[in-house]
Image (spheres, rainbow, N blue to C red):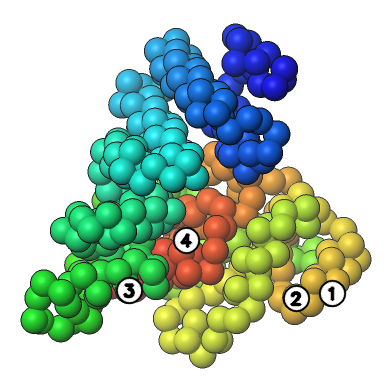
Amino acid sequence: KEIVDKIIHSENIPYTTYSRLAFNILKNRDLFPENEIKDIINQLIDKALIKLKESIEYQKPQYFSQEEWKKVTDANLSKFYQDWGDILSLMEKPEEALEKYLAAIEFLQTDLPVSLSESAILLASQLGRDTLALDLAAQAIFDSKSTNFIDSVFKNIYLKTNHDNADSFIDSLRTKAVIKRREKIRQNMLQTQLDIFLQGPDKSIINLSTYKGNILILVLWGKWCSPCVDLLRLFELFDQKTLIKQNLILFPVNTLDTDEKSNSEFLKQNNLAINYYLDPNYEIALNAGLTGLPVTIFIDKSGKIRHIEKGYLDKKSYEQIFNDIIEILNN
């Protein structure tokens, strides 16, 4: 309790700390008298909101435009209200929790985190607000953020109020979602011309301009990067005949690390049987203004960089963006 009091009255703690502390208190209720928990949680949330608003008002980096800063702050506010809703759910206050989830949604409008959509849909359906749950589920499907749970809720509620086939309606939403996704990708396509040279493990130099007429996929990876291993495993599963049919050539590129023996041992330890290339001086990343790994670079048939995908979250979301980009570049 003394630690909680110190944190509440401290002025140099990030706003996220208060939310995390509130979660921990609710998961360890036996540490506090039950009649004090509500007051403590309210103090923590109030303090977190004050700190968040202060950071929005006073901590904008100079290199951020007002539009860029608004996107960042809207995302932070949305996450704060989502956490607040989760806390209220743990306190068994579903109506108040749903109110906070809807506030979180208001900051983002579309392309919501799946966890936020699922939480709001679950509470709306439990509270008998079927129209709201149906609308939220439809939006999630349209944003390509659907899950088995969201599909199930949508079907159940849709069948209550409509005589049409729910699966057909979901299919139509998914078709619209694909069009929406790909149009957004097209609008943000790059037109970067960059001379790229790779080094093979045998020290031979490869000029990627000799591969014009094909779509080139460069996957920048490093041995220290665990998501990189997951991404390389995904590429191992790709069917070679399909890649050839789509005019795709993959180039897994190890950045900085040129030790052939060390790289071979690393791939063997992780059961990866891939041919890899080297970017010994990190030139690709430096010239393209990249930081962090993994990074996937999509190069079109004319040799221009058209899209750069940073990171790797999971197989489903990565395959979705990968297939969308390849479809665009092949048409």
Hey, what amino acid is under mark 2?
A: Leu
Q: Position of residue 275 (x, y in %)?
A: 71, 74
Cα distance between the residues tagged 3 and 2? 37 Å
The N terminus lies in which quarter of the figure? top right
Of callouts 3 and 2, which one flags the residue occurring earlier in the amino acid sequence? 3
The secondary element bearing badge 2 is classed as loop
**In this picture, is 328 found above or below 1?**
below
Cα distance between the residues tagged 2 and 4? 22 Å
The secondary element bearing badge 3 is classed as helix
Q: Which mark is residue 152?
A: 3
Q: Position of residue 137 (x, y in %)?
A: 27, 61
Q: Which mark is residue 326?
A: none
Q: Is residue 102 left or right of residue 276?
A: left
- Which residue is drawn at the image coordinates 54% and 64% (left, top)? 314
The secondary element bearing badge 4 is classed as strand
Of callouts 4 and 3, which one flags the residue occurring earlier in the amino acid sequence? 3
Image depth: mark 4 or mark 1 in front: 1
Disc 4 target residue: 298
Label 4: few (<14), some (14–19) or many (≥20) C-alpha neighbours in 10 Å? many
Disc 2 target residue: 272
Cα distance between the residues tagged 2 and 1? 6 Å
Cα distance between the residues tagged 4 and 3? 35 Å
- Which residue is drawn at the image coordinates 43% and 39% (left, top)? 88
Instruction: Find the residue positioned furthest to the left.
Output: 163
Hey, what amino acid is under mark 4?
A: Phe
Label 1: few (<14), some (14–19) or many (≥20) C-alpha neighbours in 10 Å? few
Quarter-of-image position of residue 327: bottom left
Q: Which mark is residue 268?
A: 1
Hey, what amino acid is under mark 3?
A: Ser
Label 3: few (<14), some (14–19) or many (≥20) C-alpha neighbours in 10 Å? few
Q: Nearer the viewer, residue 188 or 117?
A: 117
